[in-house]
Image (cartoon, grey):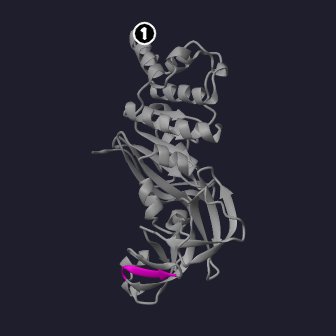
Amino acid sequence: MNALLELKNIQHAYGKQVVVNELSLTLKKGQIGCLLGPSGCGKTTVLRCIAGFEPISAGEILLNGVVVSNANFCLPPEQRHIGMVFQDYALFPHLTVAANINFGLHRMQKTERASRVAELLQTVGLADASSRYPHELSGGQQQRVALARALAPRPDLLLLDEPFSNLDVSLRERLSLEIRDILKSQNATAILVTHDQDEAFAIADEIGVMHRGEIQQWDTAYNLYHKPANRFVANFIGQGVFLSGKVLDSRHVEIELGVLTGDIPHQCTADCHLCCEGYPVDVLIRPDDIVHDDASPVQAAVVHKAFRGADILYTLRLPGGGTALSLVPSHHNHAIGEKIGIRLEADHVVAFSQSVP
C-alpha cells in the first residue's frame, strides 16, 4: 500500500535554533499515527509543517505522493485537503452543533450536506444535540463536534493537536477510545500530537517518540514499552529503573535479583565484543517485573508507596542498595520501612551498555 503521508528528512528552525532535525516518517491510508514527547521536543511544529502553517528548510513532505513542502515551496494549507482538531476545539459559538459540522461542506449539494451531517451526528453520538449550541455542551461533547466538523469534508489527512488537554483524566481516557473508534469507522488517516502516553497508546496504531526534534523510535505501543530503541525511549515510556548487571553470554544477563534471558544488550548486534562474559550493562526493570511473594528468600524494604485503587506502586530498597518499583494488588498493604518478599518475573529483557549514554 502506498503511503498517504511521507516526511523525508525534514528540517525546521527558528533562526539558528533547529526545532525539527532531519525527521522522517511514513503513514499509510487508514492508519493513526502519533507524535509523543515532552514539551518543547518539536512535535507540534512537525504538525504545523504538515498542515502548511510552517515552511521547512530541508527535506520533503508528500501527500499521496505529491510534494507539498520542500525548501523552496510550501503549498498553502487550504489546498492540502487536511482537517485539523485544535486544543481549544475552535467551535463557532453562534452556530448550532449541526451548523458547525456543516460549515466546511459548502461545495456539496444541499441534500448531500444534510446526509453527511446526519451521518456524523450519529457517528459521534450527538444526534439528539444537533440544535444545541457549543456552550450548552460538555467538554467531551464539544470535542466530538470538533472532530465531526474536521471529518465532514472527508479530508485526506486529519491532524489532532493535544485534543484532550482541556479535559479531566477520566473523560480523557474514555474519549480517547471513542475517538479511535470514530476515526476507524470513517477509515480516516490521522496524526495525533500528545505528551500523554495513555492517549497515544489508546488511539494510535504507531507512535513516534520525539526528543530534541528527532524521532527516537517509530513503533507500536507494545514495542516501545518492551523493546525500546534507546535509553531515552526506555526512560520516557512507562515506569521503571535501571539496575546494574553483567553479561553472562549473548542470551543471559545477571542482576542482583537473578538471571534474565533475552537479547542483551542492544549494542551486541553492532559490536559483538560487548557480549563477552562479565561486560557491565544497565537492565531496565519495570514495576510488573517484580512480583510480591511472601515465600521468597529475597527481601526488599518499602521506602515509598502510591495507592492506585486496585494496585499499590511500591518503591523498594533492594538488598544491594538499589531501588526498584513493584506493582502489587492493593490488599497487600505494607507499611513504610517494612520488608516484603519479592521475586523477579520478567519476560522481556531491555539492557544497554553502561558505556553508552
**Where residue 162 sits: x, y (%)?**
58, 42
Q: How crowded is mark 1: few (under 14 residues within 10 Å), some or many (20 or more)?
A: few
Residue 252 lies in the magenta stretch = yes
Point out the stretch of residues depicted in magenta.
250-255
**Where residue 198 sits: x, y (%)?**
54, 48
Residue 34 lies in the magenta stretch = no
Residue under the point 48% across and 20% down: 121
The total of numbered circles placed on residues is 1
Can you tell which quarter of the image residue 31 is in? top left
Residue sitting nearer the eye, 2 or 232: 232
What secondary structure do most residues of the magenta stretch adopt?
A: strand
Q: Which residue lies furthest to the right in this view?
A: 336
Provide the residue designation for mark 1: 110
Asked whether residue 112 appears in the rendered view, the answer is yes
Residue under the point 63% across and 17% down: 133
Residue sitting nearer the eye, 202 or 170: 170
Q: In this view, does 352 lie above or below 138?
A: below
In what quadrant of the picture does the N terminus appear?
top left
Can you tell which quarter of the image residue 341 is in? bottom right
Q: Which residue lies furthest to the front in this view?
A: 295
**Where residue 132 sits: x, y (%)?**
60, 15
* 103 lies left or right of 156: right
In what quadrant of the picture does the C terminus appear?
bottom right
Q: Is residue 316 above or below residue 113?
A: below
Residue sitting nearer the eye, 202 or 96: 202
Asked whether residue 81 appears in the rendered view, the answer is no
Q: Which residue lies furthest to the top in this view?
A: 111
* 270 lies left or right of 95: left
Residue under the point 49% across and 38% down: 177
Q: In this view, does 41 lie above or below 291?
A: above
* 261 lies left or right of 50: left
Q: What residue type is labelled 1?
A: Lys
